[in-house]
């Protein structure tokens, strides 16, 4: 290991320190629990105590925080009161076999994991952690501490939303045995031209996230020095990571739109015949009272994902949710219709070909009409699987809706999509934005959130 220039570092693990100063489980009401684990068996970072203090401070009024360094801390009973585990600079083999099994079940059942910097040099005998959380990117080496440019690839994520497209900062920059890209969603990478000692070339991820069963795992290669923990940008980075893990990997789609011309942010809407009445404030996105705005398009692009969206339409109105901007679940005033078709609310809209008869084909009606009356808030819960392509760009798997629930009712299951539905934009691709139709009548959206599947994506926010 290189000598540390900006932080006090200890080369041996030494005896565990008492860092359990958080609020004990059960004494903080319904606040979520965050367990910060920092046991080491090898190199011990001098910033561990600063990390504990920061997480404790960030948690005030938000989470209850516990610290631990005992090797037997991970048991089903202890984890039952925890929502997110933070591995703060853990190095070497510091979790027992029974603890690893408990952690696997914890994550698969919906727990969260945030691994910080040195954790990539720990638990090398735990394949689940190495493959599922790290994407195979174990620590290999690092140059001396220096300034570098971090390229932010996804600015929707809470951990990277507070920094610009390039985050210039000083840290100890890890080289990994391999790039995890393709196994995880890369949030940020290093520009190796901006510093000396990088060995991974043009693809050097440094921050990433990934779903793990019903849970979510996050890794950041930042955070080596004591000074990092007093920097507002890094504090926001760590807070966003923990909050994302607490939310099981869900991200609110409430900003960073690529396109939103004509859309308004209001406090509430009510239906008045075929129009909407708007109340000043924020929290609800609406395409104007007359319903003739451009489409609302996310700045980020997505592949496999889960999407939750709540919508309200007045009498006779029409909209639609397009996954990847190409595959539409229709929104329409279809309340009470006895035999809904693919163009009715909840239908998977038809593909379209002007050269054939009938021009519309492969549309899928909902199994049942679950549409509520106009003026009532409704919901879609969609599990979507993106098309897959080989190295030559040839499609090897079609896109499909794994499931669609309308107002909690299962209306589609395992529907394969031979191509984009009518109104879909562009040729099929592994990733694309979510698009909400805005020019066919008044519609309001709220509580729009998305959870990524595994895989990489680059977020291009031109606005």
Image (tube, rainbow, N blue to C red):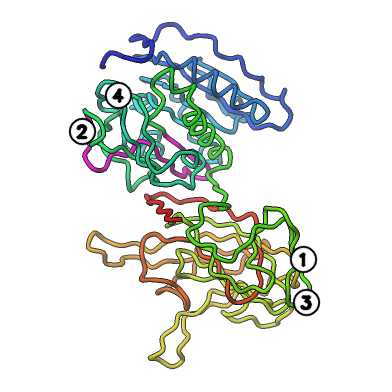
Name the mark on residue 270: 1
Magenta stretch: give its range. Answer: 197-219
Camera-near label (4 vs 2) is 4
Q: Relative to 455, does residue 159 appear above or below in the rendering?
A: above
**Side of 376 relative to 170 (left or right):** right
Q: Is residue 39 magenta?
A: no
Residue sitting at x 36%, y 71%? 427
**Mark 3 or 2 closer to N-term?**
2
Give the Cα distance between marks 1 and 4.
Answer: 56 Å
The residue pinned by badge 3 equals 273
Give the Cα distance between marks 3 and 2.
Answer: 64 Å
The residue pinned by badge 2 equals 199
**Side of 449 relative to 284 (left or right):** left
Q: Position of residue 302 (x, y in %)?
A: 44, 56
Per the image, label 3 sits on a secondary structure element best described as loop
Camera-near label (3 vs 2) is 3
**Mark 1 or 2 closer to N-term?**
2
Circle 3 crowding by C-alpha within 10 Å: few under 14, some 14–19, many from 20? few
| Circles 1 and 4 in contact, beta carbons < 8 Å | no
The residue pinned by badge 4 equals 146
Q: Relative to 383, does residue 171 appear above or below in the rendering?
A: above
Residue sitting at x 45%, y 63%? 324
Residue sitting at x 62%, y 30%? 80
Per the image, label 4 sits on a secondary structure element best described as strand
């Amino acid at each position: 290991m290189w000598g540390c220039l900006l932080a006090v570092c200890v080369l041996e693990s030494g005896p565990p320190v008492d860092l359990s100063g958080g609020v004990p489980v059960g004494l903080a009401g319904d606040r979520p629990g965050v367990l910060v684990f920092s046991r080491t068996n090898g190199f011990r970072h001098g910033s561990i105590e600063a990390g504990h203090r920061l997480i404790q401070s960030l948690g005030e009024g938000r989470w209850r925080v516990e610290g631990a360094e005992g090797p037997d801390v991970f048991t089903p009973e202890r984890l039952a009161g925890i929502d997110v585990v933070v591995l703060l600079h853990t190095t070497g083999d510091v979790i027992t076999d029974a603890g690893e099994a408990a952690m696997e079940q914890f994550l698969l059942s919906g727990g969260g994991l945030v691994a910080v910097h040195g954790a990539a040099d720990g638990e090398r005998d735990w394949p689940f952690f190495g493959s599922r959380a790290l994407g195979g990117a174990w620590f290999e080496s690092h140059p001396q501490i220096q300034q570098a440019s971090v390229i932010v690839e996804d600015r929707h994520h809470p951990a990277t939303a507070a920094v610009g497209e390039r985050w210039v900062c000083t840290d100890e920059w890890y080289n990994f045995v391999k790039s995890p890209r393709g196994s995880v969603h890369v949030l940020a990478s290093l520009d190796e031209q901006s510093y000396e000692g990088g060995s991974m070339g043009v693809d050097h991820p440094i921050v990433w996230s990934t779903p793990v069963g019903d849970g979510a795992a996050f890794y950041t290669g930042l955070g080596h020095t004591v000074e990092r923990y007093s920097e507002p940008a890094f504090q926001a980075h760590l807070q966003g990571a923990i909050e994302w893990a607490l939310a099981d990997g869900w991200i609110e789609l409430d900003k960073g739109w690529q396109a939103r011309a004509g859309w308004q942010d209001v406090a509430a809407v009510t239906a008045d015949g075929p129009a909407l009445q708007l109340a000043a404030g924020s929290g609800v996105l609406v395409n104007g009272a007359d319903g003739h705005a451009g489409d609302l398009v996310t700045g980020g692009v997505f592949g496999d994902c889960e999407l939750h969206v709540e919508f309200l339409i007045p009498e006779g109105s029409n909209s639609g949710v397009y996954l990847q901007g190409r595959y539409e679940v229709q929104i329409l005033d279809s309340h009470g219709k006895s035999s809904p078709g693919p163009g009715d609310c909840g239908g998977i809209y038809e593909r379209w070909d002007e050269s054939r008869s009938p021009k519309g084909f492969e549309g899928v009606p909902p199994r049942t009409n679950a549409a509520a009356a106009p003026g009532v808030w409704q919901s879609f819960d969609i599990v979507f699987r993106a098309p897959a392509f080989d190295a030559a760009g040839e499609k090897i798997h079609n896109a499909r809706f794994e499931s669609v629930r309308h107002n909690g009712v299962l209306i589609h299951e395992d529907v394969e999509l031979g191509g984009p539905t009518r109104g879909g934009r562009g040729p099929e691709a592994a990733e694309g934005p979510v698009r909400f139709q805005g020019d066919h009548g008044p519609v309001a959206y709220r509580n729009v959130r998305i959870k990524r599947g595994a895989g990489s994506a680059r977020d291009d926010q031109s606005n």
